[in-house]
Structure formats: structure tokens, C-alpha cells
Image: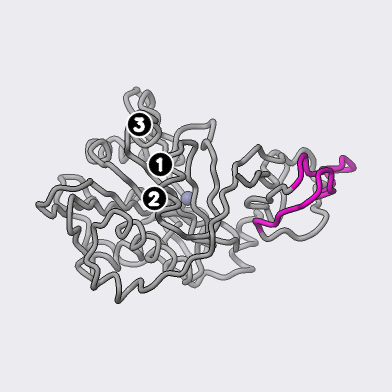
């Protein structure tokens, strides 16, 4: 049994996939992509769900927007369900298994990879979605995480991603990170990561995959995204989002991961995520005798693993900015 299947057993699977087949046909010529055009000048916004097939909260959020007939009041709005093959493979007995089918959809968004000869079901889907994504000005990409952790925004490495995160206003924690060496995320694709262009993207992690609360956070973040772009009916917004009285956000720049080197890594205490360790040199864990200490003061613990696995990341460390 893997760490993640233990986690599913421990935390339960309360939020399950919902029926999204009514949204298959769409109107773009690409399955599961629908563009609503207000006919009024304004940005092309996109809310994307199911970049990872088992991160079902985004599907619930888009279903909410469809069922409530949410339409952009200016510009265009694309609602998109990404990794359908993975979503359709969901099995509640193995809830982590449907993250992807052939490869991680969120590592293929290098232009050279999309243009290249390699084949996978995720690449086929990414290539089908790409002509629409190419026309998007601003994107919200909805995700969740494999363990109960506070929700967070991932702003990417450009200043415009931080600006968008601040404008969305919640969740409170905003992580500034450059993505993955293994391949680009859709939030870092082309225009979104080009500092010379205004297009911005934000990724929201809505907490644990299978808590009902994740769907609520996904809906709320979607409404905030539309509010920021002044693209949603204020009456609907008042009814479904209401007054927001946000705590000041914390922006945290990832400095690097702590990688587990042995089978005997133990944390010095239980970390839930986003603890700030005040002193440089504080012991946070032991890796078969090797002491792991904070490399600087006010070190933030980002996405700590509950069960550290050799070769994987135990925790990412970050600085408040
Ligand atoms: Zn994800």
C-alpha cells in the first residue's frame, strides 16, 4: 500500500466525480470546452478544471457555473474540463490512480513538446485544447492536493501572477514557484509566462482532493477571478459570494525542496503546512541520522509530506516576501 492510498483510507473520499457529460459537446469543436461570448469588448477568460483527473473539485465548480447560467458580462469566458480520459477512469477504491492516464497533463505545456512528435493521450488532449488556450488572456486553473492542507494559490514566477493572485484575494497563502523541471504546467504556458505580455494565470489548490470543502473553495475562487475581471453580474456575485473581508495574503517564495534520501526520514514534529519556523538552524527532521535544519529565519513549510518517501520531496521551504 502506498502512502497516498493510506491517506485516502485515513481521510475518506467524500467528494466524488460529478456528471459532466452534458458539457461534452461544447461549442468550440473541442470536446468539453465551451466559450461564452458576451459580445462586449473585454478579455478572454478561461477557468480550467481537471488538469489532474482526480482533482474533482474543479469539475464541481464548472458544473455550478453551467447550472447557474453564469455568462461573462464582457469579453469571453471559456469553461474547460481538461483530462477527461483520466477523470473517466476514476475508481473510488483507488482514488489517486486517476491523476493521469499516460503522463502528467500539467508537464506537457512546453511549446516544443506540443509541437514535437511524441504521442500520449495527454498530449493528444493538450494539442486539441491548444488553439483555444492560445486565444486566452487570463486563466484560472483549479487543482487540489493529496493530503489535508490549507488551500493556496500558485502564482508562478512572474510578477503578473502575483498581481493576479492579490486581486483574487484568497486563499490567504500565495506560493511563488517556477514550476517543474519535468515540463511546463498549463499555468506557465506561452503567454502566461511571457513577461512582455499582459496575460496572467493563477493555479488554485483547493485543499484535499476529496473534501466537500474543496468544491466550495473552487467555486469561490472562480467567482473571485470573474469579479476581478469585472466579467460577472454583480447581483449574482452578491448572492453567491457576498462581501469578502479578506485577511492579508502571505506571499511565499519557494527556495527549494528537502529531498528524502533514505527510508528513515522522520520529521521532528507534525507539520500541517505553512508553519513559519522563526529561527535559522532549527531542526525540522532527521534523515537516517542526517539532521535537516531550516536554512534561514522565518522559514515557511510548504506542502509537507505526511509519509516521506525516499527520493521524493519531504517539504518545500519558502521565504516570506
Ligand atoms: Zn493538480
Q: Secondary structure at mark 1?
A: helix
- Report how far apart the C-alphas of labels 1 and 3 lie in the structure: 9 Å
Q: Which residue is mark 3?
A: 190
Quarter holding the N terminus? Answer: bottom right
* Of callouts 1 and 2, the N-terminal one: 2
- Is residue 1 at least partly visible in the picture? no
Q: Secondary structure at mark 2?
A: strand
Q: Which mark is residue 187?
A: 1
- Is residue 179 at least partly visible in the picture? yes
Neighbor class of circle 3 (other Cα within 10 Å; few <14, some 14-19, many 20+) is: some
Q: Residue at x 50, y 60 (%)?
A: 171
Q: Which residue is mark 2?
A: 141
What is the x, y in percent for residue 193?
A: 40, 33
Q: Nearer the viewer, residue 1 or 113?
A: 113
Q: Which residues are magenta?
A: 273-297
Seen in the picture, residue 127 relative to 209 is either above or below; the reply is: above
Amino acid at each position: 500500500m502506498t502512502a497516498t492510498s493510506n491517506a485516502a483510507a485515513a481521510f475518506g473520499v467524500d467528494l466524488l466525480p460529478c456528471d459532466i457529460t452534458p458539457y461534452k459537446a461544447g461549442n468550440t469543436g473541442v470536446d468539453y470546452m465551451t466559450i461564452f461570448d458576451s459580445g462586449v469588448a473585454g478579455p478572454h477568460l478561461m477557468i480550467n478544471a481537471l488538469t489532474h483527473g482526480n482533482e474533482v473539485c474543479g469539475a464541481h465548480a464548472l458544473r455550478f457555473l453551467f447550472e447557474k447560467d453564469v455568462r461573462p458580462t464582457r469579453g469571453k469566458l471559456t469553461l474547460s474540463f481538461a483530462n477527461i480520459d483520466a477523470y473517466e477512469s476514476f475508481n473510488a477504491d483507488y482514488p489517486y490512480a486517476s491523476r493521469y492516464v499516460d503522463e502528467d497533463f500539467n508537464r506537457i505545456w512546453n511549446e516544443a513538446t506540443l509541437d514535437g512528435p511524441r504521442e500520449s493521450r495527454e498530449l493528444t488532449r493538450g494539442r486539441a485544447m491548444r488553439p483555444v488556450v492560445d486565444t486566452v488572456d487570463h486563466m484560472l486553473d483549479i487543482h487540489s492536493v493529496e493530503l489535508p492542507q490549507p488551500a493556496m494559490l500558485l502564482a508562478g514566477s512572474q510578477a503578473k501572477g502575483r498581481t493576479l493572485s492579490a486581486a483574487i484575494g484568497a486563499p490567504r497563502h500565495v506560493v511563488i514557484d517556477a514550476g517543474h523541471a519535468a515540463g511546463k504546467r498549463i499555468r506557465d504556458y506561452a503567454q502566461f509566462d511571457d513577461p512582455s505580455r499582459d496575460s496572467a494565470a493563477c493555479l488554485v489548490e483547493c485543499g484535499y482532493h476529496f473534501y466537500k470543502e474543496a468544491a466550495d473553495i473552487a467555486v469561490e475562487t472562480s467567482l473571485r477571478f470573474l469579479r476581478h475581471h469585472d466579467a460577472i453580474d454583480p447581483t449574482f456575485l452578491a448572492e453567491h459570494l457576498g462581501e469578502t473581508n479578506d485577511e492579508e495574503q502571505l506571499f511565499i517564495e519557494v527556495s527549494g525542496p528537502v529531498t528524502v534520501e533514505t527510508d528513515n526520514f522522520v520529521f521532528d514534529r507534525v507539520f500541517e503546512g505553512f508553519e513559519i519556523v522563526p529561527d535559522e538552524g532549527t531542526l525540522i527532521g532527521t534523515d537516517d541520522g542526517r539532521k535537516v535544519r531550516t536554512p534561514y529565519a522565518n522559514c515557511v513549510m510548504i506542502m509537507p509530506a505526511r509519509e516521506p518517501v525516499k527520493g521524493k520531496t519531504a517539504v518545500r521551504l519558502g521565504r516570506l516576501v
